[in-house]
Structure formats: structure tokens, C-alpha cells
Amino acid sequence: MAEQQRIVINGGKRLEGEIAVQGAKNSALPLLAATVLCSGETVLHNCPRLSDCDAACRILECIGCKCRREKNTVTADASVISGVEVPTELMREMRSSIIFLGSILARCKTCRLSFPGGCELGPRPIDFHLKALREMGAEIVERHGYLDCSAPKGLHGARIALSFSSVGATENIMLAASLAEGVTEIHNAAREPEIADLAEFINKCGGKVSGAGGSTVAIEGVEKLSPCEHRIIPDRIAAATYLCCGAISGGELILTGVDHADLRPVTAVLEQMGCSIYTYGKGHLFINTRKPLVSPGTIRTNVHPGFPTDAQPPLMALTSVASGTTVFVENIFENRFKHASELARLGAKISVEGKVAVVTGVKALSGAELISTDLRGGAALVTAGLAAEGTTRIGGLSHIDRGYENIEGVLRSVGADICRR
Ligand code: UD1
């Protein structure tokens, strides 16, 4: 249905008010996968209502878990696992479904997934995941687009050195290692906040993970994990998006339920552009943009605590109306500038060559018909639409719905003229 819908924005309204930031999609997905490790009923609070989370719940159901949602609390009962195969449609619906490999294999000693393939951001290889699991004793056969995985004698600990700090690979290894025999060490592990959240969850369930958040993570396997109750961390990318929305409207927003430290790589750039940002209380952040925005110079996306690649598209929308020239160097994904040509329809001046995009700030944008081609690119179009004169219509909403809980409702509640038709 989202395919026929459009977000319609009449730009130029100043945003003012308070936004309670949703739970982190990128934590929710590995945590939903982690529930497979616990034989019993796990409760996850602050689980955002997103199509990606629904897809993760459907994966749980298709292997025999019972999953129910009440508002933002998801209860997953993995007392019985009756299947080990994830159908192709579900694997295609959500590329990060590969995260289920580690937990299903650890719990059931066998697993069949179809290859997730490429995605909107370019090729999405899973070689680090497969290499690491093989080092832990898994036999993985890749044929006819399927991954047939087994570890008849169970997985064992290993010393794994990642050639790149992949978030998904680090998570998959942590999940697999939690029930493996012996100790697994991940060197050059990803340091994203979502990794620390997963470690906290596994430890609450009786697992033994140390070092998460640093570049070496150690996991001592345990015989069994018991279910627990856990609150998912705030979504730093949704927060970054709403900060860009506030800034582009010259407005004043309070975000609640955020983690200041996790947002620092983004807030530092916004301050450089002329926004005033204050943190106060427990998880409150205030942004005010009175001065004209100026370019932050060169933005290089990097692994945490570098500038997050997922915040690059909304920031690009913001820099399109900041005075001066901004250079974006995209170091994480090969094909992450698709939103640039859509922003150009609004009058943005952006030239792209390979992994570099050069944005020359313009005085004003004007509304147009746009198509969102990926999740964060879609968020960039919404951000820009808020500032564009006249009406902007955005299609391709299924992408945006993967990661933003009711984006139009949230923005309308702080004064945007935005609706879904
Ligand atoms: C996660 C996030 C995504 C974010 C990304 C980078 C989730 C659900 N998604 O994605 O929003 O943009 O981190 O912060 O948490 N790579 C390989 N081989 C592999 C694995 C990755 O070459 O086996 C490459 C990828 O192609 C990419 C880079 O490593 O160029 C980073 O990918 P990775 O950190 O694994 O991202 P995801 O976990 O897929």
C-alpha cells in the first residue's frame, strides 16, 4: 500500500515543539534475532513500529517462535523452534535478515537462508559473516542462491580478525558465540552503540560478553541463555534526522529519550553549521537555529565514532541550503548518493563523482515530485521538502517506513504542514 501513497509537504513552516525519539531500528533487529537464543519469553520495550521490525517478527514466526506486539513492546517466545529455514521473500524484504544466521545456527545447529543479495546502497556482501562462522566450525554450502549451514557438533570459540569493522558481522558473531563452546574474540569489532546494546542484552540473559563498544569484544559461550526484559536504546539516526529537520526549518526542537554521547558525531557538525544545541536532564536535547546556516566543510562518513553514513543523506539536504560548499566523502557504502539527483529536482546544486559529492548551497529550494529510493535517502527528501517553497510530493514510502515510525505524524506534531495521501 505504501507504494501508492505519497507524503505531501507544503514547505516553509518553522518547526517548534517536542519529539519523543523512537527506539533504534538497528538495535531492535539484532535483539529480535537474539531472542532465538533464549528458550522462553523475552520482552523488548521501546521496539519501534517499523516494517523492518515486522519482517523480523515474521522471520521469528516462520521458525516457530510466537511473537506479539502491544504498542512498542514486543514479546517473543522462543520456547520451541520448529523450523530453521527463512523463506526467500523474507530474506529479500529485509537485507539485514542475515543477522538471524548466527542465532538460528547457534540454537539449532543448522540453518537455511537464501542469499540476501545486493541492495539499494550497492552490493551488500556477507563474506565477513560467513568467514567468521566457518572459523567457528560452521559448514556453509552456497548453492542455488541458498546458504545451507550446519554445525553438527556445535560451534566453537575462535579468534576472529575482521578486515573491516562490520556492524552486522560483529553482531552475527556475538550471537553465534554466545552459545558456542569456549571463548570467541572479535578483533577490529564494530564499536557502534547498537553493539553495546546487544552485549547488554546477552549479559542480562546470562551470557558473558565483555569489551563491547571497544574494538576487541570477547564472548565466552554458555550452555543456555534465559529470557529477560530489555529496553532498546534510542534511535540516533532518527534523532539526527529530526535535528536536521528542525535546523532546515530555522526552528526550535526538543528531542526527548536520546543519548547525547551517541549523537555527538552529528551534533558537532550541526553546531559547526550554526545551530545551538544544549543537552539537559536525562536524554533531553534542545536545538535552536537562529543564525543562517553555513557549510561544515568536508564530511567524511566513517565507522563509529566517525560521522555515521546513515546521517549523510539528511545532512546533505541541510547543507543544500547552507552558504558555502560542502564536500561529502562516503566511505562506507558504494552507492549512497541516490538522493542527490532527487534533491536536485528541488533546486539543490550537487555534483557526484564516485564516493564524493559536492554541494553548493543555494538560497532556496522549490517544491517538486520526488521518489525515495532508499531509507535514509527518503528521509533526506522529507528534510528538504520542509524547506522547499510550495508543495513537495514524495513517493516510494515503503523505504521510509522501514526506519521511521510515523514520520509525517511526528513532524506534523511540531508544526510541519505534512500529510500522507
Ligand atoms: C549496519 C546498519 C546500517 C548502517 C551500517 C553502517 C543495521 C541493521 N544496519 O548495516 O544502517 O548503514 O551498519 O553503519 O544495523 N561488508 C563487506 N562484507 C561483509 C559485511 C560488510 O564487504 O560481510 C561491507 C559492506 O558492503 C559495507 C561495509 O562493509 O560497505 C559496512 O557494512 P556493515 O557495517 O556490515 O553494515 P550493515 O551491518 O549491513
Image (spheres, helix red, strand yellow):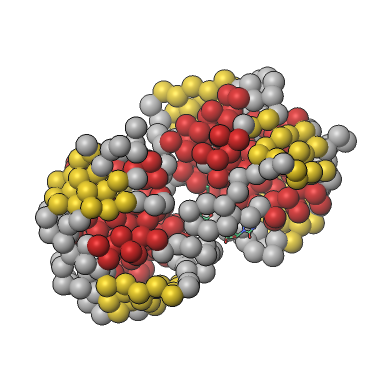
> Is 102 on the left-hand or right-hand side of 265?
right
Residue found at x 20% / y 56%: 368
**Residue that extends furthest to the front in the rendered view of this protein:** 144
Can I make out residue 18 in this image?
no
**Residue that extends furthest to the right in the rendered view of this protein:** 153
Residue found at x 17% / y 57%: 367
> In x, y percent, where is residue 198?
58, 44
> Is 82 on the left-hand or right-hand side of 286?
right
Q: Nearer the viewer, residue 99 or 205?
A: 99
Q: Nearer the viewer, residue 331 or 285?
A: 331
Can I make out residue 336 in this image?
yes
Residue found at x 59% / y 28%: 60
The C terminus is located in which quarter?
top left
Residue found at x 44% / y 28%: 73
Above or below, 309 relative to 3: below
> In x, y percent, where is residue 215?
64, 62
Quadrant assignment, res 362: bottom left
> In x, y percent, where is residue 17?
18, 47
* Quadrant of the picture in which ligand 1 is shown: bottom right
> In x, y percent, where is residue 136?
81, 48
The N terminus is located in which quarter?
top left
